[in-house]
Amino acid sequence: MCLAIPGKIIFLDAKKEYATVDYGSGTQRQANITLVDAHLGDYVLVHAGFAIQVIEEREAKETLKLFREMLSFQEEG
Amino acid sequence: MFSLHDKRLADDIISRIKKEDVHLRFMHVCGTHQDTLIKNGLDSVLRTGGITIGQGPGCPVCVTTPREIEEILLLAQKGKTVATFGDMIRVPGITSSLQHLKADGCDVRTVYSIDDAVGLAEKNPSKDVVFMAVGFETTAPTTASVLLRDPPSNFSVLSCHRVIPPALHALLEMGEMKIDGLIEPGHVSTIIGLHPFEFLSSRYHVAQVIAGFEPLDLLMAVWMLVRQVKTGDSRVENEYTRAVKPEGNTKAQQVMEKVFTTADVKWRGFPVLSKSGLLLRKIYEEYDARIKYENDLLELNDKEFSEPVGCLCGEVLRGLISSKECPLFGGECTPDSPVGPCMVSVEGSCTIEYRYAKKK
């Protein structure tokens, strides 16, 4: 139930209430974006048809690096 | 998309955990976490490192009470068009299930989103559409958002929404078992942020880490919990920083605050938990199915509802036993013929255990 899938906003409607979200592998679906401040090109987490959060793209891409840093920090500490 | 795969890093985290030589019991409250743990065999790998992880009441369909199920069954029987998420349709009530009522000719619809249920009401103005709203803080804002946009008057909501922190509080307060750390649910946390969990660490000295849903997320969260325990620390750490901000999603919180008020409600397997349920505020009572159809529901007023005979979903939800320890598991109770909701929902620990045990 709390499953949420990340996808990229590729189209916004004029009222900015709905967006077309691309989940990769050719899957695209409409999502309600009224609960977030999202822009074209943003990555969002979608749950039950609603975007519930904008994903920090930089943070997401650097997660592994961040993990390695935390582990080496603890090693030193 | 943004999936985390690095076997060397995973092996590194596991060997670090093993070196700590600990014997700890952690709990999480999310079916998606359970799915990641069991599907990837992390539960058994971690057990060899002295870490046991159990699933608590983290399945919204599972904690829905027999009374709430009887409410929606009765509304379907009284001619309402009932819409809800797929899992809920199959949960057995005392008298029937929505799936059986559908087979008997009642109007029961499976929807992907509450928006679909509103669309159903718009297209069928002569039908009374009731949406059974199930879910924690991840889902509750979607219900609230719809009610703020003036849905049609033939639409209403049976709110069964619940919030997670009071259930964690109850588990720690009841003290039925030792909990050394909590893996907090990532998507509930995208909405509520870190702060609502903090009182648990200060009051019960329990370590907490908010975690994402990739195998590496969970391994990292376990490592962070182990470190907290080893250093005598107890606080809320955030492993899922790419999606969870300390303050959460304030826009969603405001939407929820406008529409819902907290109420003391029962959870399956638990007593009534203070301020753990979300009911519609009075100004939205025209959309509150319990008020709108009060007369239809009258006959439930004095009734007591118990769990199905022999069902140990309550014990599973409190983390006291694993699914496999229930005598009904895999015999009398299977996904094709479930006795309790933990064997119905894709987030139920019994369904998850059954599904992957069959594949192994």
Image (cartoon, coloured by chain):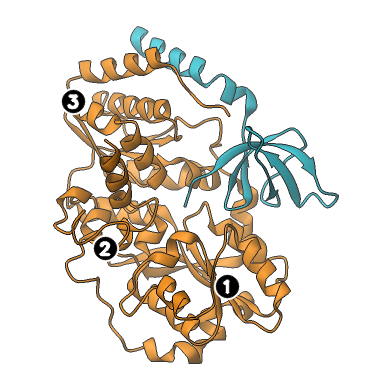
Amino acid beneath label 2: Gly
Q: Which chain is cyan?
A: A
In the rendered view, tell whether residue B95 sits above or below residue B181.
below
Q: Quadrant of residue B62?
A: bottom left
In percent of the image, x 43 and y 35: which residue is there?
B211
Q: Mark 3–mark 2 contact, CB under 8 Å?
A: no
Which residue is under mark 3?
A: B48
Local SS, label 3: helix
Q: Position of residue B131 (x, y in %)?
A: 56, 70
**Mark 3 or mark 1: which comes first in sequence?**
3
Question: Neighbour class for label 3 at 10 Å: few (<14), some, many (≥20)?
Answer: some
Q: Residue furthest top?
A: A76
Which residue is under mark 1?
A: B281
Q: CA distance from mark 1 to mark 2?
A: 27 Å
Which residue is under mark 2?
A: B269
Q: Is residue B106 left or right of residue A37?
A: left
- Asked if residue B208 can be seen in this view, the reply is no
Q: Position of residue B11 (x, y in %)?
A: 32, 15
Q: Quadrant of the N terminus of chain B?
A: top right
Q: CA distance from mark 3 to mark 1?
A: 49 Å
Rendered colour, chain B: orange
Q: Position of residue A22 (x, y in %)?
A: 68, 37
In the rendered view, tell whether residue B294 sits above or below residue A6.
below
Q: Quadrant of the C terminus of chain B?
A: top left
Question: Neighbour class for label 1 at 10 Å: few (<14), some, many (≥20)?
Answer: some
In percent of the image, x 18 and y 43: which residue is there?
B178
Which of discs 3 and 1 lies nearer the camera? The answer is: 3
- Asked if residue A36 can be seen in this view, the reply is yes
Q: Quadrant of residue B41?
A: top left
Amino acid beneath label 3: Thr
**Mark 1 or mark 2: which comes first in sequence?**
2
Local SS, label 2: loop
